[in-house]
């Protein structure tokens, strides 16, 4: 699957950000520049594709003078370059990661130190973009700590620690972190809380910061478990049919919807289970399994056996999309991500069985003549393809599938921490 997807990208869309497999052309989109696919997938190419060295030179073209998302550049490009460096030892990747990281620093020039969401890589200035998003300014810590360690420049770590300091100081409603914060005032803009889009990877980076520090970052650990307890108390629900899910919180009112993006949380809770207080460790592992089971149900209850963008638990619906606008699948990785983590943690064969179900569904409904495409409705067998092979399909979905069926010592969880774009970063950042 990986080779087929990559070969078609290389043949029809080389130098563009993504492949349009039906029309066999490239798509630049709204990221920036070119070679998004190469930046996102440079680590998996090293692992899986013999021609890696011939594409190494593409890294020289990753930088682009234009506006870009701070979050996306960090998780895709900086994360990918760091990962490539740890896998190969090639100084080119380290130097490019640091160079790109330096271009992101002006985004932090705000009254609060909370970065703007959009950075101009040409003028080295930020572009006004309103409120800052929790999942964006809260998903920098892993990469920036690595940048400080590799460059010996403390500024990267100082920037992300200033974010943490502010988050610890401000009041959190019911212990929850809303999704929008003003980078000017340092106050929450809306009281909308979700573990899916807008919030998701902030929580992931708390527990992973602790794990990446050889479990010495006790502040990250405390923040993570406090947040998880608040999520359990306010968002975790049980459906009439016995499915555990995470609702969204809008100013105290629950919206009984769970997004595909929130399905990463099964794996997140799983990898953090063993470091909770002793009396709750099994509880956390059980909760991780329950969330992962619910996300699997969102797949099995669709006609195609692929999950919708969001599914609901109201008006008699359970783990199904009730709105036409939520019925699509764009090759997302989060459910398979949790399968991989739960397999590694428990070795329960059902997770590999579920992963293989996903492989068969992807082959049947998403594979087209020149790549893989998302589909517009998971509840119909007559596929309507969206003509987009997303970059994260290779960098995350297929990578997690590959790891799910690989031996545990391939990118072992004891030695590697995956960033939110599935780029493996060495867990012993100081000792590499």
Image (tube, rainbow, N blue to C red):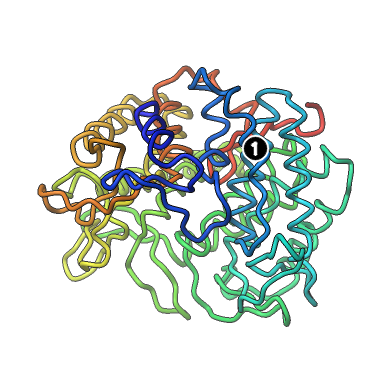
Relative to 106, residue 304 above or below: above
Snapshot quadrant of residue 170: bottom right
The residue at 64%/32% (across/down) is 57
Q: Is residue 8 left or right of residue 377?
A: right
In front here: 260 or 270?
A: 260
Snapshot quadrant of residue 256: bottom left
Q: Quadrant of the C terminus?
A: top right
Q: Badge 1 is on which residue?
A: 59
Crowding at mark 1 (Cα within 10 Å: few <14, some 14-19, many 20+): some
Q: Quadrant of the N terminus?
A: top left
The residue at 49%/44% (across/down) is 284
In front here: 132 or 203?
A: 132
State the image coordinates of residue 210 (x, y, percent, origin top left).
Answer: 69, 43
State the image coordinates of residue 181 (x, y, percent, origin top left).
Answer: 63, 75
Look at the numbered disc 1 and give the secondary structure of its residue. Answer: helix
In front here: 291 or 424?
A: 424
The residue at 32%/32% (across/down) is 355
State the image coordinates of residue 361 (x, y, percent, origin top left).
Answer: 22, 37
Relative to 77, residue 165 above or below: below
The residue at 55%/56% (across/down) is 228
Q: Is residue 376 left or right of residue 80?
A: left
State the image coordinates of residue 302 (x, y, percent, origin top left).
Answer: 17, 49
Q: Is residue 192 left or right of residue 170?
A: left
């Amino acid at each position: 699957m990986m080779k087929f997807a990559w070969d078609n990208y290389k043949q029809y869309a080389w130098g563009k950000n993504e492949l349009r497999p039906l029309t066999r052309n490239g798509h630049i989109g709204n990221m920036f520049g070119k070679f998004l696919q190469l930046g996102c997938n440079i680590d998996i190419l090293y692992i899986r594709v013999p021609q890696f060295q011939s594409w190494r030179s593409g890294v020289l073209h990753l930088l682009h003078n234009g506006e870009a998302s701070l979050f996306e550049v960090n998780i895709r490009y900086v994360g990918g370059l760091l990962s490539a460096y740890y896998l190969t030892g090639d100084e080119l990747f380290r130097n490019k990661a640091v160079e790109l990281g330096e271009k992101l620093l002006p985004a932090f020039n705000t009254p609060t130190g909370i970065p703007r969401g959009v950075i101009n890589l040409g003028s080295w200035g930020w572009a006004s973009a309103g409120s800052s998003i929790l999942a964006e300014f809260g998903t920098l810590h892993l990469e920036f700590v690595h940048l400080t360690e590799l460059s010996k420049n403390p500024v990267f770590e100082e920037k992300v620690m200033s974010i943490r300091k502010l988050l610890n100081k401000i009041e959190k409603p019911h212990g929850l972190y809303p999704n929008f914060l003003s980078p000017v005032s340092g106050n929450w803009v809306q009281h909308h809380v979700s573990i899916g889009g807008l919030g998701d990877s902030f929580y992931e980076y708390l527990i992973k910061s602790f794990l990446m520090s050889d479990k010495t970052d006790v502040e990250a650990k405390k923040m993570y478990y406090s947040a998880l307890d608040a999520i359990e108390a306010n968002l975790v629900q049980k459906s009439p049919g016995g499915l555990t899910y995470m609702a969204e919180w809008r100013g105290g009112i629950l919206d009984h919807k769970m997004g595909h993006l929130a399905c990463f949380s099964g794996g997140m809770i799983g990898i953090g289970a063993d470091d909770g207080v002793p009396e709750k460790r099994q509880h956390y592992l059980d909760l991780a399994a329950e969330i992962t089971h619910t996300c699997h149900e969102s797949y099995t209850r669709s006609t195609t056996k692929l999950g919708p963008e969001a599914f609901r638990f109201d008006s008699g619906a359970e783990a199904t999309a009730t709105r036409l606008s939520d019925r699509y699948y764009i090759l997302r990785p989060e459910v398979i991500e949790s399968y991989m983590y739960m397999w590694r943690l428990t070795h329960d064969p059902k997770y590999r069985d579920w992963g293989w179900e996903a492989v068969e569904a992807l082959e049947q409904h998403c594979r087209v003549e020149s790549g893989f495409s998302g589909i517009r409705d998971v509840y119909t067998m007559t596929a309507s393809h969206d003509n987009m092979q997303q970059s994260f399909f290779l960098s995350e979905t297929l990578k997690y599938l590959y790891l799910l069926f690989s031996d545990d010592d391939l990118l072992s969880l004891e030695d590697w921490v995956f960033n939110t774009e599935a780029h493996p970063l060495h867990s012993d950042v100081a000792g590499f």
